[in-house]
Amino acid sequence: MDAHQVLLLRAVLGTIIAIVCLALAARRVLVLYGIVKKSGQPTPDRPESPMASTIIETQSVEVIGQKKLLAWTIPGVAHVFAFWGFLVLTITVIEAFGELYIENFFFPIIGTWPVVLFAEDLFAFLVLVGIAMFAVIRLRTNPAKQGRYSRFFGSHTGAAWLVLFMIFMVVFTLMMYRGAKFNIYGGMDGAFFSQFVGGIIEPLGETANEWIETLFILGHVSVILIFLLIVLHSKHLHIFVAPINVMFSRRPNGLGPLLPIMYKGEPLNFEDPPDDALFGVGRIDDFKWKDLLDMATCTECGRCQSQCPAWNTEKPLSPKLMIMDLRDHLFSAAPYLLATAAKGDRDEMGERNELVLTSVGETVAAEIQRPLVGSREGDEHRSTDGYDASGHRSHEGPVIDEDALWSCTTCGACVQQCPVDIEHIDHFVDMRRHMVMIESDFPAELNGLFKNIEQKGNPWGMNASMRNAWIEEVDFDVRVFGMDGEDVIPDDVEYLFWVGCAGAYEDRAKRTTKAVAELMNVAGVEFMVLGEGETCTGDSARRAGNEFLYQMQAMQNVAVLNEIKAKKIVVTCPHCLNTIGREYPDLDGHYEVVHHTQLLAQLLRDKKLTPVKPVDEKVTYHDPCYLGRHNKIYVPPRELVASIPGVNLVEMDRSVEKSFCCGAGGARMWMEETIGERVNVNRSDEAIGTGATKIAVGCPFCNVMLNDGTTQRKQEGAASEDIEVLDVAALLLDSVKE
């Protein structure tokens, strides 16, 4: 065959391959769009067209800049090599398709620039380096050997190896045809890798090189198109949808508030809810379309799983596996969802369309009728939710194990670590909302929590008259709102001190309350407390899924705070900080809320507080989840500890953004922990391991949990009796008081 015949051959074959593969790809894209956008509920909190500034920010920082991935240095670097490699090699892909029709084709204008050819070859080489790094990482963390201790446990490892092989083939076929091209046409200054390969195959002769060029051009095009189809049908769909998911993600400071229950574009009115309102998520098509996009975007990388306090203490909850469960259920039920979406009307509450069920076949019908949340009985589910190392699990029983759902502490480690901005907590809480408000199916211990908040206004079930008991234990005056007949907070009061339920009733938290009050008194800060006018913020009820109860508490508190014209509020509880400061604005409660460590740090900077008494102790600081990850307050507590003379501050391995939860969040404070190791003991062991004699905290819940954990270890003889858990305010007070 002459050159023209060879060119015609590869043009015809290449065109046929391209048409078939691109048609299949287009069909898959339409199906995916239908599954996500048409099956999901409206998402009024997400703009249909994000602002240009948002798009530029998200794509620059998280997609192009790979910010979250680079937090894990070695895997991050490998991913950067692969990601940037494929961006640069887009030029070579265009050239490969051009080569089907034009001999010695280069990208117009820039294609023959030496710097461009060098960059193409450099990044092709770096892609190979990246996949080699990925291969080593997967071999070293093989879930078949490490079990649940591998972040890849439950991930589809076979699919991952297939994709690595396909990436290798993309580069291999590219270099082979470029090497042959160099031998035939010459030139290509700067293309060092292509020239190297060309040198290897040059001895085969001119004719062989011509056929190598043709075969590997066709091979390269085929590999790219087949790779496209594999990506569209696998977990690596994130290659295309991750930038979209990142673009539509919530971008608060920290993890932000929980999303309210919406109805027709507005927060649901709980005083008069409509009959067709959705209270949480009870079926896959109750999720919003952005939630479904989250599921489709999961990379199965396991970063969330590796940081999850539940998974690390042998609970069945893995954020990764739960998202995978939901995704698999979504795709398996897709024929039914697409069929009902095409009808243009939603199924009746709790009822499926029998005609559609009949038309989609028994397998799909059985899948769509699986309960979303329920009990997976049997020991095989107690720690792994029934998964094996390679990502296989039975499709029998409920989609989500109830033990997994209720193990979540809402610590936010999963959201913090996710490189594609999946919002796990929103989905988990939405499922809890349905279980509590519709199914009335939740852990029995929560009955007491809900009853105490509803009847007594606090989780402990204490009388409101006891909220001021701590005041009798201090030797300075504390102003209580209303005692002098005030209708509003007086102008001379700088801060309303929101004591909180723990700060008023729990003995260890009361020590913090008294310490903060005394420090403010010493610094000359005028403050006032509400006393019996305080009631629970509703945080625990909301995280437990009881949105009704949260709304009742929140509306009551907002009404009181607005009536007394509260402006600046200081709190000792990060959960109160997050709820009042980040969630009450949805109910027209707008206040400047600061954590006590922020206020005390500012008083230190202003020289209104001066630590003078040395505290010759080794101290470690535990970052509360709702202070750190949820609100990005990491520095002020450390400032306070570091300001104390004689203190040796030592950090735990898991600290700051990677801090490990105490186990109390997500209403877990009020539930028994019967599966696996106790979360608070795991964290206490880490704190004890630093050799610290003082464990400083900035949250009353953390105080309780770590006190209980260290006490257990003391009783077992695994910790020194000298170890003490206390709030940073109490530690500071010991130094301020001479």
Image: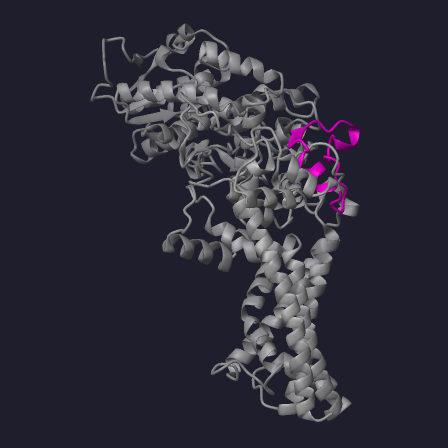
Numbered disc total: 0
Q: Can you see residue 578?
A: yes
**Residue 242, position as x, y percentages in the image:** 54, 53
Magenta portion: prevailing SS class: loop
Q: Is residue 375 magenta?
A: yes
Q: Which of 189 and 448 is in front in this view?
A: 448
For the C terminus, give its image quadrant. Answer: top left
**Residue name at image x 30 percent, y 27 percent:** 568
**Residue name at image x 41 percent, y 34 percent:** 643
**Residue name at image x 42 percent, y 33 percent:** 640
Magenta segment: 363-392
Q: Nearer the viewer, residue 188 or 345?
A: 345
User: Is 452 placed above or below 202 here?
Assistant: above
Q: Nearer the viewer, residue 239 or 653?
A: 239
Q: Can you see residue 318?
A: no
**Residue name at image x 51 percent, y 44 percent:** 290
**Residue 671, position as x, y percentages in the image:** 61, 20
Hey, which quadrant is residue 537 in on the image? top left
**Residue 514, position as x, y percentages in the image:** 40, 17
